[in-house]
Image: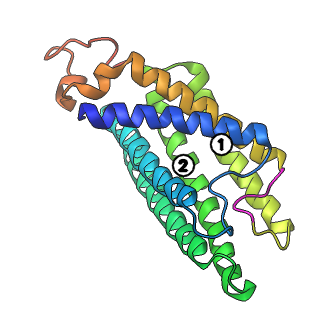
Amino acid sequence: MPKFLFYTGTAFCLFLALSSAAVALNDGSGFIAVGGGLTARAAWAALVALVAGVCAAAIFLRMAALVAARNLFAAFVSVVAVAAALASLVWVVMLQSRMLILGNAQAMIVRPLEEMHLAGCLMLAFFLSLSLLALRPYFRIQASRFLSALVFFPLPLVLLIVAQELFVKGSSAPLPASSPALVVFYGVLSVLFFSITVHCVRHRYLFLEMTNLRELLDRRVNPPIGGVAFDS
């Protein structure tokens, strides 16, 4: 993995952790406020969100490559889920850019985009949660039991938020504001991304060094260094 991409991804994971914590403390939904017109701040926010998603996806894909030696199914699910989450992020950012351009247009024009934006955010949250859950074998081996247990929480919380949306009519926010499930979801994401940042810094050799899957599986070829081998 290129050093620039690794350090950039680690920095953006920390940025996502701090952003999620700030949104959880503010008790609301904070993924770029839409509907206020096209401003330089909103445009930069959309661009930063897109770059952060791409860099964090690169970290997840590297984890999926490392876990492939032990659990190939989890690695494939992780790759598909990360790709779907990245596609959902691009779709949400494109919708937000269109909504920002329209600004204070007629409600009958903006309303369909707001509904698609809500569905896109829920889809992004679902695939992000699925990516974290699929990477559980990696966290269980290379990280800690606490982190491997924490990845179970985002997906049920997303399903709970979707269930709430089924009974809340007329909501146009990206996610239901002031929802306890939403606050807990952002709090869990903050802890997870912060833990991933610490893990990447402490085990950067796993991401920077070249990896041969045959060497990871066969201890006779290359003895495990720092717990890299998946033979436990």
Q: Do the residues under discs 1 and 2 have CB atoms within 8 angstroms?
A: yes
Question: In screen coordinates, is 160 left or right of 216?
Answer: right
Q: Residues within 10 Å of mark 2 (few under 14, many from 20)?
A: many
First-in-chain label (1 vs 2): 2
What residue would you read off at disc 1?
154
> Residue 189's x, y, as percent?
62, 38
Q: Quadrant of residue 69?
A: top left
Question: 93 above or below 231?
Answer: below
Check disc 1 and give the amino acid type: Pro
Q: Residue furthest front?
A: 40
Check disc 2 and give the amino acid type: Leu
Quick one: 201 or 49, which is closer to the camera?
49
The N terminus - image quarter: top left
> Residue 84's x, y, as percent?
46, 59
What residue would you read off at disc 2?
128
Q: Magenta stretch?
A: 173-178
Quick one: 18 or 104, which is closer to the camera?
104
Question: Residue at point 39% right, 37% down?
Answer: 9
> Magenta includes 177?
yes
Main SS of the magenta part reads: loop
Q: Secondary structure at mark 2?
A: helix
